[in-house]
Amino acid sequence: MATERTNITTVMKLMVENGTTDTGAVKYAARTLSSINPEITDEDLLAIGRELADMQTHDLGDVKRSDTATLITGA
């Protein structure tokens, strides 16, 4: 039997620079956006993340994507 993915959800995290540590390393804070359409391409998600980052004061470090799904045995 084939395995199927259901209940897929996608979350985008914008990792933005948020100061420095005592040793001078950059600290990051996450800006999390939920309820992203799981059909979005990685390229589109990155482009949207960069556009959103341009609207705030902190510099963008990374755009992260997290997909979660339930696996079931198909018929």
Image (tube, helix red, strand yellow):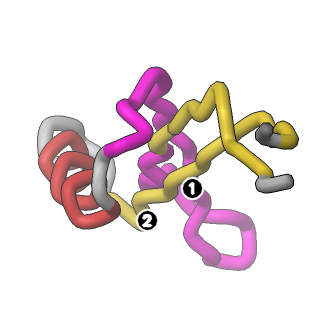
Q: Residue at horizontal 78%, vertical 40%?
A: 74
Residue type at tag 1: Tyr
Q: Residue at horizontal 43%, vertical 65%?
A: 62
Q: Secondary structure at mark 1?
A: strand
User: In the picture provided, is 53 more to the left or to the right than 66?
Assistant: left
Nearer-the-camera pick, 53 or 57: 53
Give percent across and percent down for residue 3: 79, 51
Any magenta on residue 27?
A: yes
User: Which numbered circle lies on residue 62?
Assistant: 2
Q: Which residue is mark 1?
A: 28
User: Which numbered circle lies on residue 1?
Assistant: none
Give percent across and percent down for residue 17: 45, 57
Sooner in the amino-acid sequence: mark 1 or mark 2:
1
Q: Residues within 10 Å of mark 2 (few under 14, many from 20)?
A: some
Nearer-the-camera pick, 1 or 41: 1
> In this picture, which residue range is highlighted in magenta?
13-39
Quadrant occupied by the C terminus: top right
Above or below for 52 versus 64: above
User: In the picture provided, is 34 more to the left or to the right than 28?
Assistant: left
Q: Secondary structure at mark 2?
A: strand
Q: Tell me where residue 69 sits by quadrant.
A: top right
Nearer-the-camera pick, 74 or 67: 74
Above or below for 29 versus 11: below
Marks 1/2: CA–CA distance: 9 Å
Any part of residue 16 in sight: yes
Residue type at tag 2: Asp
